Image: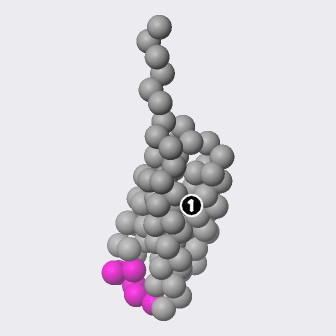
Amino acid sequence: MLQILSLPLLFSILGAGYVSLNDEQRRPQALLAMVLFQVVGSIAYTWQPGLALFALLTLHAAVAAALMTYHAQSRPLLAPSKD
């Protein structure tokens, strides 16, 4: 199961990190995708537990928590004016 999930989880970390730091308009969608990857990985861990997969999921969760904290502390997006 680690071989199946390692590249998508690493891509999720890199992609969400890039989008979160460089494009604040798409940040919520990137964080949602990252959480969904975490859920899929957690389901896979319940099917076939292993230390390496647990370590990868822990890394993924730590990065997701850091990016969510960054998002919560950043300035709020202003709604576009209707004028």
Quadrant in the picture for residue 82: top left
Q: Nearer the viewer, residue 50 or 72?
A: 72
Q: For mark 1, give the secondary structure.
A: helix
Q: Is residue 12 visible?
A: yes
Q: Position of residue 35 (x, y in %)?
A: 42, 60
Q: Position of residue 14 (x, y in %)?
A: 64, 61
Q: Position of residue 13 (x, y in %)?
A: 58, 64
Task: Identify the residue at image location x=47%, y=30%.
Answer: 78
Q: Position of residue 64 (x, y in %)?
A: 49, 65
Quadrant in the picture for residue 16: bottom right
Is 53 one of the magenta-colored residues?
A: no
Q: Is residue 5 visible?
A: no
- Asked if 68 appears above or below 2 in the picture, the reply is above
Task: Identify the residue at image location x=58%, y=51%.
Answer: 20
Q: Nearer the viewer, residue 63 or 53?
A: 63
Q: Nearer the viewer, residue 59 or 70?
A: 70
Task: Identify the residue at image location x=58%, y=74%.
Answer: 6
Q: Is residue 15 left or right of residue 62?
A: right
The amino acid type, in three-letter code, at marker 1 is Ser
| Structure colour scheme | one colour
Task: Identify the residue at image location x=61%, y=42%.
Answer: 23
Q: Is residue 63 left or right of residue 14?
A: left
Magenta stretch bounds: 45-50
Residue reaching furthest to the bottom: 51
Which residue is the site of mark 1? 12
